[in-house]
Amino acid sequence: MSTATTPTIPEPPVTGRLPALDALRAIGAVAVVGHHVGFQTAVTMNTTWGGWLARLDVGVAIFFVLSGFLLFRPWALTVATGRPRPRAKRYFWRRALRILPAYWLAVVVCFVVLPGNHPVSAGDWLRHLTLTQIYGPGQLRHGLSQTWSLATEVVFYLLLPLLAVLAVGRIWRPVRTVLLASSGALLTVAWIAMMGAGWLDGALHTMWFPSYGAWFGGGMALAAAHVALRTGTAPATFRVLDDLASAPLACWGAAVAVMAIATTPIAGPRDLTSPTAVEFGTKMALYLLIAVLITVPVAFGGPTRAKEVFSTGSARWMGHVSYGLFLWHPLVIELIYLLEDRPLFTGEFVNVFALTMVFGLMYAAASYYGVERPLQTLGTQSRRRPTGRGPAAGAPAVPATTPGAPATTPDVAAPA
């Protein structure tokens, strides 16, 4: 058993929220919008700084690391504090309410509105409504190409209760839990090795869950370390995370430096050409490091000015609607080009990006207030019905707009 150390940095109670993480979802969503607009306008290929836009798909890594952190944290916390585990049935119900209705609405609108999707086959409807469109080549449709990552993330949602039990066990051993959570990297390494051996398709299988086990596992490992630090059960080595969090500008500066490396050919081509296994693996490693460097100053340590900024109402609102921005911005881009009769790979980046953000946020707000938030409320009300038993601390019980609470299955902005 690791020697425990008591946290020395002021922090909200272990059962408290981490509201600053809302803004990270917004950053990830805006990065993905920039990535897609850069591709649509061909800026990623034609300018000296296009490599930065091409690598803004790092927003996917931010989303996946956040999912691992926020969704695994309740399981680690309940074992560390001796409380009942979250109930899988409730967890799945809240995940379904959070993700599926808004997604299904986007699928219907894209299939009906966008001419490029006509005619829509029964197979198209079945695959997209069941999030199985990534398991065959050429099955992503107009306005919905970004949903490959949502299909990948849903696999993590389904596996999480089992992964959590295996990683945490019945007795809280933080070092063991961190190591087991981090083993997702082994899955990714093995998967990429099979790509290199020619056993897997570098275009198709890079969308499947094993390619991103390292990202989800990285988030889970951070969650286990966070719980250990906040409950006073962490070994002294874990305190480096709190120390790093006290210097957010240094962490983010390091993230920018790693991003600069990722913009080079070492991380693969900028276009849709399939990367080699080495290029893909390099990109996965660099993006994981960037996502961790961005997340640590917001999730760990005590109060900082950076956390105050990330916790402002406007920043958190952007986080709340970020899932809608993810869902609707490709439709907005396509409509801009259709209405202006503009050929693909033309247009001015700043103009298209601004229009996409404005109208994307309008669609996102309508989705959030008309679909997502009412259903989050429904999930919360169903949890509050008398059950004849005391509340299980750490169960997915509070609204998704309060991420970081141990009872939360948080509002995760799905990646692109």
Image (cartoon, rainbow, N blue to C red):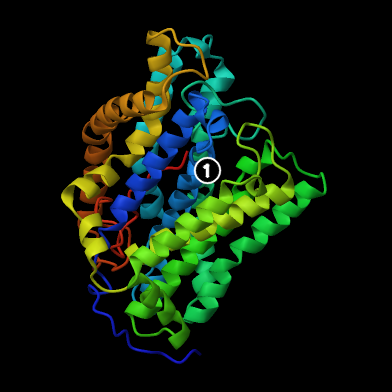
Could you tell me residue 236's position as x and y percent?
A: 44, 87
Lateral position of residue 360 relative to residue 270, left or right: left
Q: Residue at x 20, y 58 (%)?
A: 386
Q: Secondary structure at mark 1?
A: helix
Where is residue 403, by image quadrant? bottom left
Is 125 in front, or is 38?
Answer: 38
State the residue position of label 1.
55
Q: Residue at x 33, y 81 (%)?
A: 231
Is 381 in front, or is 166?
Answer: 166
Is 106 in front, or is 315?
Answer: 315
Q: Residue at x 35, y 24 (%)?
A: 351
Image position of 211 with respect to 70: above or below: above
Q: Residue furthest left?
A: 313
Could you tell me residue 298's position as x and y percent?
A: 33, 63
The answer to whether residue 154 is visible is no
Lateral position of residue 123 relative to residue 293, left or right: right
Could you tell me residue 62's position as x and y percent?
A: 44, 52
The answer to whether residue 301 is visible is yes
Image position of 375 with respect to 177: above or below: above
How packed is label 1: few (under 14 Cα within 10 Å), some, or many (20 or more)? many
Q: Residue at x 38, y 54 (%)?
A: 91
